[in-house]
Image: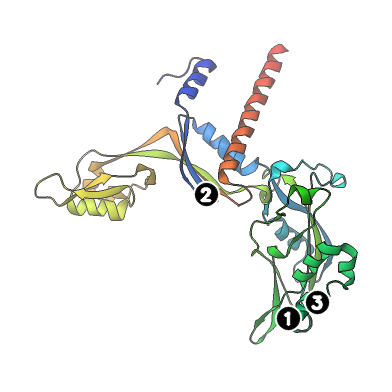
Amino acid sequence: MPTPKDGKEFLKRFREKFDLKILSQEENEMVFELIGCDVSFANALRRILLAEVPTVALEYVYMINNTSLLHDEVLAHRIGLIPLNVDPRLFEDLDDPDEATDLNTVVFKLQVSCEMQQNSRLQKGKDDDMNLETDPNVIQNAELEKAALAAARKKAIETPGRPYTKHVYSGDLVWMPQGAQAKHFPNGIRPVHDDILIAKLRPGQEIYLEAHGRRGIGRDHAKYSPVATACYRLYTEVELVEPVYDDDAKELVYVYEPGVFELVPASKEGKEVEAKVCNSYACTMSRNYMRNPTLAEAVKMTRIPNRFIFSVESVGMQKPGVLVAEALKILQQKCLSLIDLTREQDQL
């Protein structure tokens, strides 16, 4: 096809041929197909997903007491990498930490200690409540302190022949609602996963800190990236230019290209089975079949330059479909900004 003569023709072709088809969608994974676009479009979408779709992560960590083996900086870094299950679209950007409000900041507290005596404080039955009403920390901050105190009094883990150890997990982080956040987030704000190991404490060690989260993008720090993977590959069109029978067909189906071909009854007398293309999407362009001279002549694979298979795996903060939609909005805004800049330049 000839090169478009101007931008209008290029845009017309793009509108006529562009299509997006969702091939599979799960809780945190989505595979879709981009048809009729240039590689620059697909790569721009990938880069935006990785680095420019905003999320909320813990940024400022205020250490009150840390007697664990982890240095304050290492502990703060580990806590910052814990993904939070909160919609960043409900928050504003925070430019100055001194201007933190309930509209741009989320606050978590972590207070965990490992007792010197294993059975000193946590017992079954009535001792589970631990006199929470009379503890001075609880009295100062009411209900919010109770959750943090209960997390700090979990049982430690015993290993024969070794001192017992308390594992500190992301689930021990306690959300501290600020302003009207309790109303806006009735289900609360929690880490995406409660079983992320933060630290291990030995008897007498304690971690007591407060962490403030803000909205950011992956370009500033990887902890803000909303995706674990965002990648694409060219769609491969697979054809059988010559029929493949029996042993060669089985070798092609089960060894060289699993999932791409299937066995069907042979259409030729004297043959049992033959290979047939069943799923071109499963082709990874490995070309292992070329080790067999017969298959090298019979199979033809062609990459389509304007057709992409896109895979997105979310960290869990938002659904992959939402992330793709947000990335397209950002790409649209970039295009509009570029148009405005060119118009301003023309007027000079």
Does residue 244 appear to the left or right of 130 in the view shown?
left
Q: Position of residue 179 (x, y in %)?
A: 84, 49
Name the residue carrying label 2. 29
**Does residue 299 sit above or below 57 in this rendering?**
above
Q: Position of residue 90 (x, y in %)?
A: 72, 42
Left-right relation of 329 to 22:
right
Q: Identify which residue, 261 or 105, lies in the foreground.
A: 105
| Residue at image location 78% in from the left, 52% down from the top | 182
Density class for disc 2 (Cα within 10 Å; few <14, some 14-19, many ≥20) is: many
**For the residues marked 2 and 3, what is the alpha-carbon distance in whole angstroms?**
43 Å
Q: Name the spot of residue 231 as percent of width and height, x first.
A: 52, 44
Of helix, strand and loop, which one carries label 2?
Answer: strand
Disc 2 marks a residue whose amino acid type is Glu
Instruction: Decide: is 318 above or below 325.
Output: below
Q: Is residue 27 above or below residue 46?
A: below
First in residue order: circle 1 vs circle 2:
2
Q: Which residue is mark 3?
A: 130
Q: Residue furthest left?
A: 270
Which amino acid, by three-letter code, is at mark 3? Met
- Which quadrant does the C terminus fall into? top right
Per the model, the C-alpha gap separating discs 1 and 2 is 43 Å
Residue shown at 86% from the left, 44% from the top: 99
Q: Nearer the viewer, mark 2 or mark 3?
A: 3
- Of residues 277 and 346, the one nearer the viewer is 277
- What residue sits 38% from the left and 43% below the top? 281
* Left or right of residue 309, residue 58 in this image: right
Question: According to the image, label 1 marks what residue?
Answer: 125
Query: Tell me, what colour scheme is on the image?
Result: rainbow
Frontmost of labels 3 and 1 is: 1
- What amino acid does circle 1 point to? Gly
